[in-house]
Image (cartoon, rainbow, N blue to C red):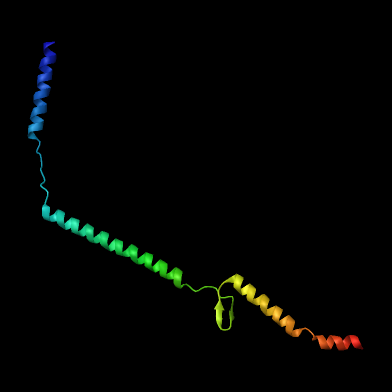
Amino acid sequence: MEWKGKRADEILSRYAQVKRSERVEIKLHDVQTHKENLGLRRRVMLVAGYAVAAAVVLGVFVLVERPQRIYGHVNGVPVTDKEEAIRHSRQMFEDLAVGMAPAEEMLGNLFSL
């Protein structure tokens, strides 16, 4: 048993020697570099925020200003709503049909023959 205690003492002493010979490097934090890095991060975040805001504004502008499909013109005003265009075209064809229909007098003359 004594040899186990002796062996443990040898191992501990070698471990202590190795640890004493190791060097510990301590790095002190450079406050100025940290401030510069913080400033750089803030600038990057600010530029990224401006880029996102510009993209949102551009997207809204494109959606609002994009050309809409024009289905026709009524009295020089473009009609962009499909339902309104259909309503105007039906009214136009009804007006044409009434204008092209034979007058009652002509039909009356035709029946009197």
User: What residue do we see at 7% from left, 34% from top?
Assistant: 21
Image coords of residue 23 (percent x, y) = 9, 38
User: What residue do we see at 64% from left, 73% from top?
Assistant: 87
Give the side of residue 3 with respect to residue 78, left or right. left
Give the camera-side residue of 51 and 88: 88
Give the camera-side residue of 28 and 16: 28
Say above or below: 74 vs 41. Answer: below
Say above or below: 111 vs 71. Answer: below
Give the side of residue 53 with respect to residue 63, left or right. left
Image coords of residue 41 (percent x, y) = 22, 57
* Residue at the right extreme, as displayed: 113
Say above or below: 62 vs 93. Answer: above
Image coords of residue 53 (percent x, y) = 34, 64
User: What residue do we see at 14% from left, 10% from top?
Assistant: 1
Say above or below: 87 vs 16. Answer: below
Quarter of the figure with residue 75: bottom right
* Residue at the top extreme, as displayed: 1
Image coords of residue 108 (percent x, y) = 86, 86
User: What residue do we see at 59% from left, 81% from top?
Assistant: 74
Give the side of residue 41 with respect to residue 66, left or right. left
Give the camera-side residue of 70 and 43: 70
